[in-house]
Image: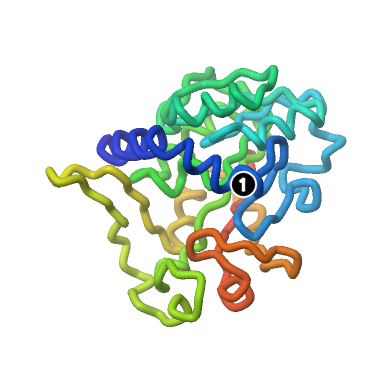
């Protein structure tokens, strides 16, 4: 857990500028997009109808440049944007906004119990932590009873395929059941980037073990309007296999 956190904090600090240049146009400054397919919260309403967000306290985890938090603020919500990377939050400052920015680890949220009505994470934190149950329990702790947490991650089936957007990425190349993390190392053998694999069943069990109730599991289809490629995500791949899994969870 400690090595993953250290490695990914450094990676995102080093690569935040390039990430925002490459993907900033797609993400926008104040859009709430759940993944590379382009599923927008305006249409999905996974946190609830937009008109019901006004006055709600919302925590965005793995916020990056806080695009989702900025959209939430425009709906009248009171968001807090949290990210492990200081450099990502500097991009949030650059774009602007009146909501708080917090640099912290999702495994140790610096908030009191029952601080938020809602929490969300669009590809933030969960794919990069070694102990997702710890993060989920922390999120549950800071939610009020009846609170909802919605998070998106790389769809687990994608781990069986090469991370290529073209035809070479359509053939199974690895075991779906191999939980070995993807790790990049420096010349001294220290991890500099870590991404952890969980199967769909693992993710469901993590949600249940943390005390949440799973309300929905959304697998967005690739829309006809989206012609962009993002790593292994592409119209070709997206028309055949899911690339994103979105978990809608509630605290009873």
Q: Nearer the viewer, residue 47 or 211?
A: 47
Q: Nearer the viewer, residue 60 or 74?
A: 74
Q: Is residue 23 above or below residue 79?
A: below
Where does residue 73 sit, x and y in percent of width and height? 75, 27
Q: Residue furthest right?
A: 51
Where does residue 207 sit, x and y in percent of width and height? 51, 49
Q: Residues within 10 Å of mark 1 (few under 14, many from 20)?
A: many
Label 1 sits on residue: 249
Where does residue 250 sit, x and y in percent of width and height? 64, 43
Q: Is residue 163 toward the left or the right of residue 61 in the image? A: left
Could you tell me which residue is drawn at 72 percent across and 36 percent down?
30
Could you tell me which residue is drawn at 18 percent across and 42 percent down?
190
Q: Is residue 93 above or below residue 207?
A: above
Q: Is residue 209 toward the left or the right of residue 55 in the image? A: left
Q: Is residue 2 above or below residue 176?
A: above
Could you tell me which residue is drawn at 41 percent across and 37 percent down?
12
Helix, strand or loop under label 1: strand
Where does residue 208 sit, x and y in percent of width and height? 50, 50
Q: Residue furthest left?
A: 188
* Quadrant assignment for the N terminus: top left
Q: Nearer the viewer, residue 138 or 97?
A: 97
Q: Is residue 26 toward the left or the right of residue 50 in the image? A: left
Could you tell me which residue is drawn at 45 percent across and 50 percent down?
206
Snapshot quadrant of residue 36: bottom right
């Amino acid at each position: 857990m400690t090595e993953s956190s250290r490695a990914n904090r450094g990676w995102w600090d080093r690569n935040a500028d390039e990430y925002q240049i490459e993907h900033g146009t797609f993400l926008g400054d104040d859009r709430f997009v759940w993944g590379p397919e382009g599923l927008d919260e305006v249409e999905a309403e996974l946190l609830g109808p937009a008109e019901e967000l006004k006055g709600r306290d919302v925590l965005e985890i793995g916020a990056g440049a806080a695009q989702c938090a900025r959209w939430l603020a425009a709906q009248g919500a009171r968001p807090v944007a949290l990210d492990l990377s200081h450099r990502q939050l500097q991009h949030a400052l650059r774009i602007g906004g009146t909501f708080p920015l917090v640099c912290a680890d999702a495994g140790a949220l610096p908030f009191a119990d029952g601080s938020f009505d809602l929490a969300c994470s669009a590809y933030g934190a969960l794919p990069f932590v070694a102990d997702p149950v710890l993060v989920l329990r922390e999120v549950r702790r800071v939610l009020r009873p009846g609170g909802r947490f919605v998070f998106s991650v790389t769809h687990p089936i994608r781990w069986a395929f090469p991370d290529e957007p073209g035809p070479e990425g359509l053939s199974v190349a690895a075991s779906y059941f191999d939980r070995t993390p993807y790790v990049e190392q420096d010349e001294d053998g220290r991890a500099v980037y870590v991404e952890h694999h969980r199967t769909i069943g693992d993710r469901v069990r993590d949600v249940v073990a943390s005390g949440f109730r799973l309300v929905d599991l959304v697998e967005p289809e690739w829309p006809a309007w989206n012609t962009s490629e993002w790593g292994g995500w592409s119209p070709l791949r997206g028309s055949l296999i899911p690339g994103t899994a979105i978990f809608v969870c509630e605290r009873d």
